[in-house]
Image (cartoon, rainbow, N blue to C red):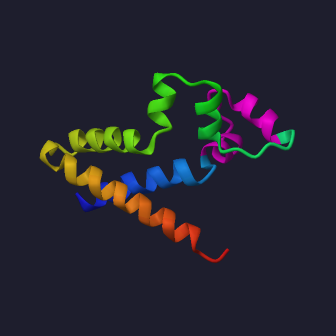
Amino acid sequence: MDIISCWVAIILFLLFETNFLIEYSKKLNFNLPYKNDYLKIIESGGSIHYLLFLKRAYSNFWINLFTCYVCLSVWLSFIFSIISFNLLEFPKINFYGLVGYLILKILAKYSVN
């Protein structure tokens, strides 16, 4: 359960606090939804995170679900609980995953670059 919560926290941190989706999609040459539109904004001098861009430009149920860290945490925790055959641990995985994400976010904010 502790390891699964760590994975949830790491996934949330990577998605919401870094631009790893865009960077890896460039390096591994795979296409993300609306990536070209996002890159045009960035190249023209814009400064926006990819998930925020998706939420503002193409808001629908699935994008809102993916761009909400609480919603995504619930679904990731649920999926990991099913994979580990332990649905009773779902609330703990979700709670500790969210707490871990928020701790990582605070640590990144106050870290020295």
In the shown orientation, is residue 58 left or right of residue 81? right
Q: Does the magenta stretch mainly form a helix, a strand or a loop?
A: helix
Question: Residue sitting at 64 percent across and 49 percent down?
Answer: 19
Question: Residue sitting at 55 percent across and 67 percent down?
Answer: 108
Q: Where residue 22 sits in the image (x, y, percent)?
A: 66, 43
Depth check: 55 or 24 in front?
55
Q: Does residue 89 show up magenta in the picture?
A: no
> Can you say whether 41 is above or below 60 in the image?
below
User: Splitting the image into 4 quarters, where does residue 110 fall?
Assistant: bottom right
Q: Where residue 67 sits in the image (x, y, percent)?
A: 50, 38
> Can you say whether 100 is above or below 78 in the image?
below
Q: Does residue 31 show up magenta in the picture?
A: yes
User: Splitting the image into 4 quarters, where does residue 3 fall?
Assistant: bottom left
Depth check: 55 or 11 in front?
55
Question: Residue sitting at 52 percent across and 22 percent down?
Answer: 60
Question: Residue sitting at 62 percent across and 27 percent down?
Answer: 33
Q: Residue furthest right?
A: 44
Q: Quadrant of the C terminus?
A: bottom right
In the shown orientation, is residue 110 left or right of residue 11? right
Which range of residues does the magenta coloring cover?
21-42
